Amino acid sequence: MNTSSVQDIARQSRVAARQLSSTSEAQRNLALSKMAESLESVKVQVLEVNAQEVMKAQQDGQSAAMTKRLTIDEKVLQYMLLRLRKVAQRPDPLNRVLQGHTNPAGLKVYKKSVPLGVIGIIYESRPNVTTDAAGVCMKSGNAVILRGGSESLQTNTLLTDAMIEGAADAGLPQHAIQIIRTPGHEAVGELLKMDEYVDILIPRGGKGLIKRIAEGTRIPVIKHYDGICHLYIAEDADPAQAVDLVINSKCQSIQVCNALETLLVDKEYAEQILPLLQTAFNSNNIELRGCEQTKKILPGISLATEDDWHTEYLAPILSVKIVNGIDEAIDHINHYGSGHTDGIVTQSLKMAQKFEQQVDSASVLINASTRLSGGGDYGLGSVVGISTDKLHARGPVGPDELTTYKWVVYGDGHLRN
Amino acid sequence: MNTSSVQDIARQSRVAARQLSSTSEAQRNLALSKMAESLESVKVQVLEVNAQEVMKAQQDGQSAAMTKRLTIDEKVLQYMLLRLRKVAQRPDPLNRVLQGHTNPAGLKVYKKSVPLGVIGIIYESRPNVTTDAAGVCMKSGNAVILRGGSESLQTNTLLTDAMIEGAADAGLPQHAIQIIRTPGHEAVGELLKMDEYVDILIPRGGKGLIKRIAEGTRIPVIKHYDGICHLYIAEDADPAQAVDLVINSKCQSIQVCNALETLLVDKEYAEQILPLLQTAFNSNNIELRGCEQTKKILPGISLATEDDWHTEYLAPILSVKIVNGIDEAIDHINHYGSGHTDGIVTQSLKMAQKFEQQVDSASVLINASTRLSGGGDYGLGSVVGISTDKLHARGPVGPDELTTYKWVVYGDGHLRN
């Protein structure tokens, strides 16, 4: 078992990244399929080791939600393999010519996509990040340094070792995929100092983890913060469609970043639609917290405070506000939202287009569930997360988002006058 | 004269940015031409005020190079106006559909370019940054907060007021262009805290300024660090072309980021080409510092130290190293270079392609002067700088690089299963 120092790992990753940048699409795709194959061959061990770690977490008094996230069963494992194989089928994100021209003097200039280099992924509990992240990084020709939660260290190590073997089988460099095997916070601290070798860090987990990492390093960080997602029901919304969209956005899955957290209802429509919504929410056990106007129509609910508008509940709670038209809805979203995913329900083209233009979010939806925002429904395949940053990657982060570009210039002795 | 607090300015910029994001291409281009017109009408005042500031700088004992950078004469002013008018003629960077598809369920998804929002530009001495930055920001629909050096505060303020008037004439929001009028470091410190309102900071100036800003703020920073630029002369390079390219790369302009700083010469070719180069450098008054092998061929020159390979001289000094083939050249560049601009002189397609693929720099040149890297020769028009970052923008930063994107989804009541 390799227990290299974090600095050794980072340095080896840098070397591997240089080699990866020259690999062919065929080689990287072969590696992905060999990685899946190799994982399949250690399936029994993975399920065993994971079951032990899950039992340990239960004994340590971890929550049911946490141990569920930690668990790999046959179905989860098959899904992990499927995603590796699917990412292999995606178009090559590398060596795409993004733009180019020949200038009047005959100088040929073009811009082409290249890997970012070395990517560090720091994540909590979900072992599927191990395979998803390694898959997306190999697809995009980046060396990856993995660092999962200590509660799944054995599972993650086993998964990584199998993938390393598969990748090496396809001729990828030995250190293309690495995992930090030393437990404890110190190793993460070391990784944060490796700005000489690591091009980008992607933390996956709670807000606290992300903040700690972003503030503790000079390495650029792609951040995946809150999803304070909104739906605005315009006065002309189809009532049945509005109810279906709101319920699906809130209830299809509660603890996810693209679940609905605040509902905005046009004041002209509130008396008609709110009682219908309340009935639907009651049967889904969702607690409503409303503005004063909302409480006039639904007197039984509690009053929302200023804090509620700022809150990503990730729980069966929804804040409800009555707004005076689309402008107030847009202002509310741009002020209180997190720029993740926000939608409108309307039949008006003009309102749809205004909402599309003026809401400053990574995903803007018209007559669609907020739960549809993300890699899968956007046709990106596997992603390493949903960025709430505006720079570089916004929204789902897949293989394309893990590339940068270089300018290539071919001359024939061209000089500057 | 408006002396709003930095926080007021930042808040107003945020509001202006929302409005700018909905302006049409025609309106933004009209604004650019009105900005140039308005500047032209205050030309005499600008030259006067600038002459006073230049005189003050001279009295304060500033270097000739610095006062030269500070000076606006008729020619510089005409060039500033020309660049504003030229950026107006460029294609619209906004509302480009970058990708899109309709999924099997009929959900329409596309990704379109949108402004970043509020951009802060912190710069030293050169007043032309005032007009270049405002031009690139209006083109790309971003609100801009300018903060120039105190030695050119009056000039910059006058330029900005004229541009504000021109932009307002074309119907752009009142606070689309703002300048911080308070002198002193404190105001910059305040701006660095405005992460609630400012989306990105672009410092233009020395390494010290950039470092101070990048380390003192949570706002993302596009950094424009060193240009430690290399040329590698392969063993098969045409000798006359090699000499011309090396001399042009080093001597066409000395104090610029894409000037040559280190020359790498293949060992098979060194005895033939180095004496030719030395003659050419002597007549251009360039001091050479060579590795031990170089000194064997050119005994009169001084020995380069480890520091020399890490140095961006911005001065008539060049470090010279003899390397054992293209692999050593690439390793040297990737290790000592700054990822800005690096080139090869060769007649071999295989070597050209290997260099293109393996050198990890923003610009990779084949048989072209390093001085050709940048916005103009790449067909980008006006730029706000050359990024040495890999994330978001790499190389020249023009209007396109000051955009982000949003995902837009049109459904018809689409739910997640």
Image (tube, coloured by chain):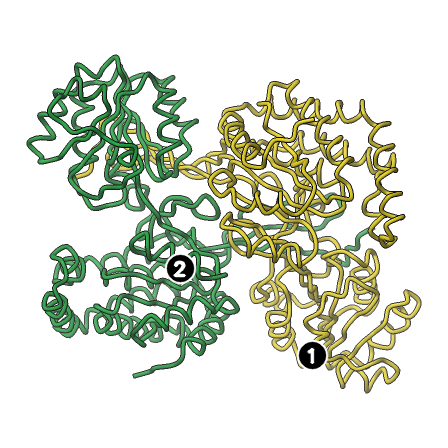
Chain colours: A green, B yellow
Pinpoint residue A224: horizontal percent, then vertical percent: 35, 50
The lab-note entry on whether marks 1 and 2 share a chain reads no
Measure the C-alpha gap from mark 1 to mark 2. Answer: 34 Å
User: Residue at left 66%, top 78%?
Assistant: B325
Q: Looking at the image, is A145 positioned above or below residue B393?
A: below
Q: Is residue A46 visible?
A: yes
Mark 1 chain: B
Residue A149, by quadrant, is: bottom left
Please tell me how many numbered marks the rendered image carries. Answer: 2
Residue B214, by quadrant, is: bottom right
Q: In front: A328, or A243?
A: A328
Q: Identify the secondary structure beneath mark 2.
A: helix
Count neighbours of disc 1 (C-alpha within 10 A) and say few if under 14, some if 14 to 19, many if 20 or more: few
Q: Is residue A102 visible?
A: no
Count neighbours of disc 2 (C-alpha within 10 A) and say few if under 14, some if 14 to 19, many if 20 or more: many
User: Residue at left 61%, top 25%?
Assistant: B28
**Which of the two discs, 1 and 2, sits closer to the camera?**
2
Q: Looking at the image, is B130 positioned above or below residue B240?
A: above
Query: In the displayed image of the protein, which residue is found farthest to the left?
Result: A283
Q: Which residue is mark 1?
A: B306
Residue B384, by quadrant, is: top right
Q: Check disc 1 and give the amino acid type.
A: Glu
Pinpoint residue B35: horizontal percent, then vertical percent: 71, 26
